[in-house]
Image (cartoon, grey):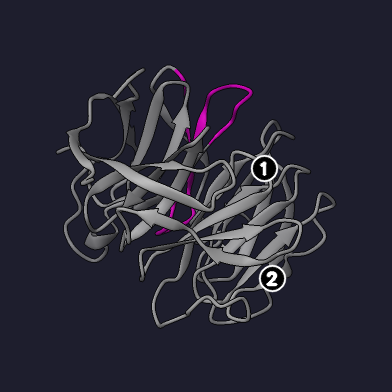
Amino acid sequence: MKPAEITARVVGTYELPGEAVFPESIGVDAATGDAYAGSLADGTLYRLTTDGQAELWAAGGQDGRGSVAGVKVDDRGRLWAAGGYDGTLRVYDLSTRELLARLDTGAQPSLVNDIAFGPRGDAYVTDSLDPALFVVRDELAALERWTDLAAGGVPWPAGLNFNGLVLTADRRALVACQTNLGRFWRIDLASRKVGEVALAGGPLEHCDGLAISGSTLYVAVNARNLVAVADLADDGSAGRVIRRLRSDAFAFPTAVAVSDRRLLVVNGQLDQMGGQPRLPFTVAVVAIPETW
């Protein structure tokens, strides 16, 4: 069955201050409902408040932070910011804004891209140029190589590979998207075995950031200017794309996050880096209906 094409119902917009923001990711603080986004261009971090305001949280260049890809917030009140091509990951205390750790993959080329938290609080990290998943334990001591994706059977062509990452509904595995091939992969947390997700309606080339709510997986598909919605098995082994959300408010969407009955869609405009981006840079707020 062909996925339904639906016009997203945009109910709000966050406007990010700055003329060259190029936001890449977003993470929601479950304790407050505030969201945080980062600039791929200069490393600025923004807070998006529940009353619809977007404000500077940390200036670009602070702590040597020149670029931010993935942004996530854990249940310990810490903000995690992936450093993109410099191969780093920074962790901040949300209440004090103190830098708690700066970690490095120790390898180049590197593109530290996205973060997902396991059931024990460990942070798992994708690197789009390095065929490995990394892990950071609670003591924040190191960005450790956790599993070899190429050895697990994942093809690794040139370009951007593993990108968005989420924990499955049963909390026993991770699911990652592979941007250049549009394929999705399941990584078992206990065995570290890797297997391809049987995704009907795929592949989704140009897949970028992911968000999950129950059995529903949301996929930012940047160059296609849409958000794909899929039903995903609780263990992440299989799924089906059921809807494609489109809107004139989308502009090369690079990330999504779920906040209550709202979907936050980051308009990265990375296709306009060095060009003429549409100002202001925005995060669109899309209503998630009770029933589609």
Question: Relative to the observer, which residue lies in front, 157 or 95?
Answer: 157
Label 2: state its secondary structure.
strand
Q: Can residue 64 be seen at all in this image of the molecule?
A: no
Residue 129 in the image, given as x and y percentages of width and height: 50, 76
Tell me the quarter of the picture where residue 147 sits.
bottom right
- Residue bearing mark 2: 147
Q: Is residue 99 left or right of residue 45?
A: right
Residue 38 is one of the magenta-drawn residues: yes
Residue 68: within the magenta? Answer: no
In the image, 45 versus 6, the foreground residue is 6
Q: Secondary structure at mark 1?
A: loop
Residue 171: mark:
1
Query: Looking at the picture, how far across and down is residue 3, in whole percent?
Result: 23, 43
Label 1 sits on what residue type? Answer: Arg
In this view, the residue farthest toward the front is 1
Disc 2 residue type?
Thr
Q: What residue sits 75% from the left and 63% below the top?
A: 191
Report the span colored magenta: 28-50
Is any atom of residue 171 visible in this view?
yes
What percent of the width, then of the height, locates residue 156?
47, 80
Q: Is residue 177 left or right of residue 77?
A: left
The crowd level at tag 2 (other Cα within 10 Å; few <14, some 14-19, many 20+) is some
State the CA–CA distance, disc 1 to disc 2. 18 Å
In the picture, the quarter occupied by the N terminus is: top left
Please say if 124 is above or below 157.
above
Q: Residues within 10 Å of mark 1 (few under 14, many from 20)?
A: some
Asked if marks 1 and 2 touch (Cβ < 8 Å), the reply is no
Q: Is residue 59 left or right of residue 73?
A: left
| Position in image of residue 217 (x %, y %) | 44, 41
